[in-house]
Image: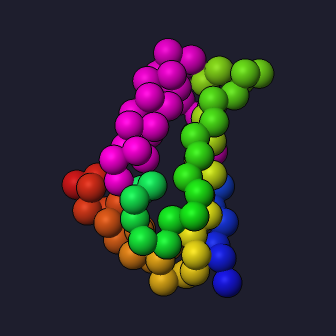
Amino acid sequence: MAVRVIVTITAPSAEAAAAGVAERVALCKSTEANEEGCLQYEVFHSALHPERFVLSELWSDRAAYDKHWQLQQQRER
């Protein structure tokens, strides 16, 4: 069964959110989008609340998501 993950991030300011969106898009293009089991990885920046952005992920199954999560933890060290 596919796994959908939605992450909402509120940055301290609109400028910080814009930088965060740019960082996530660059990371997505070079890593997550190429991971096995990644069916969708989108980054949205709120027009109404410019300090917020949302990550929308779709993984083929729980095992693919769990593998992604482990890789993500290693990247953030």
- Give the answer, above or below, for where 5 lies relative to 55: below
Which quarter of the image is occupied by the N terminus?
bottom right
Q: Is residue 73 left or right of residue 41?
A: left
Pick the residue in front: 18 or 25: 25
- Residue at screen point 72% across, 21% down: 47
Q: In this view, does 43 lie above or below 63?
A: above
- Which residue is outermost to the left? 77
Coloring basis for residues? rainbow
Tell me residue 34's x, y (percent). Answer: 40, 59
- Residue drawn at point x = 57 percent, y = 69 percent: 59
Where residue 20 sits, quadrant-wise, is: top left
Where does the magenta region start and end?
7-31
Residue under the point 57% across and 64% down = 39
Specify the quadrant that holds the C terminus. Answer: bottom left
Left/right of residue 24 with respect to residue 4 in the rendered view: left
In this rendering, would 11 be left or right of 19? right
Q: Which of 74 and 13 is in front in this view?
A: 74
Instruction: Look at 29% across and 52% down and name the residue there.
Output: 76
49 left or right, relative to 20: right
Q: How far across and how far down the image is residue 19, in percent?
A: 43, 24
Question: Is the magenta region chiefly helix, strand or loop?
Answer: helix
Tell me, yes or no, if residue 58 can be seen here: yes
Between 61 and 9, which is closer to the camera in this rendering?
61
Residue 18 part of the magenta-drawn span = yes
Furthest residue to the top?
15
Residue 21 within the segment the image draws in magenta: yes
State the image quarter where residue 35 is shown: bottom left
Count of numbered circles on the image: 0
Whether residue 20 is visible: no
- Residue 3 percent across, percent down from the top left: 64, 73
17 lies above or below 53: above
